[in-house]
Amino acid sequence: MPNTGAFHLLSLIGHANYMDEVLEELKLVIAQCQGCSAEFTATSPSNGLEQISRGVVLTCPKCRNRQAISGARFVALMKGLVDAERPHEA
């Protein structure tokens, strides 16, 4: 998974509209903070995952490092995961 600058994303669970590139819901993000190296699971605003207009704000529970990440970026990441799981013909 990618490095967003402030966080290294390890896992995502959510729903997206891939045709319109819209993040519909992000239920869970497992991330590692680049500031303090803490690994955490963000699931709600009080737990480091805040849904905002057209994106998400992640907050490290240990050092309070924060970053806004666009919904389009999450859609691209989620689409990449779905595509990686599909069997590919040689």
Image (cartoon, grey):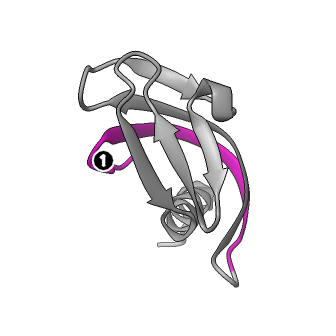
So how many labels did they put on this image? 1
Q: Residue at x 61, y 68 (%)?
A: 54
Relative to 31, 35 lies left or right:
left
Q: In this rendering, is residue 27 above or below 51? A: above
Q: Residue at x 40, y 15 (%)?
A: 62
Amino acid found under the numbered disc labelled 1? Asn
Residue 14 lies in the magenta-colored region:
yes
Residue closest to the eye, 26 or 57: 57
Residue 5 lies in the magenta-colored region:
yes
**Local SS, label 1:** loop
Q: Residue at x 54, y 59 (%)?
A: 74
Residue closest to the eye, 51 or 7: 51
Please report the bounds of the magenta region as a residue range.
1-18
Q: In this rendering, is residue 76 above or below 49? A: below
Q: Position of residue 23 (x, y in %)?
A: 67, 65
Relative to 62, 55 lies left or right:
right
Question: In the picture, residue 42 is in which quadrant?
Answer: top right
Question: In the picture, residue 6 is in which quadrant?
Answer: top left
Q: Position of residue 16 (x, y in %)?
A: 71, 65
Prevailing secondary structure class for the magenta stretch in the rendered image: strand
Q: In this rendering, is residue 27 above or below 18? A: above
Can you identify the residue that label 1 sits on?
Answer: 3
Q: Position of residue 26 (x, y in %)?
A: 69, 49
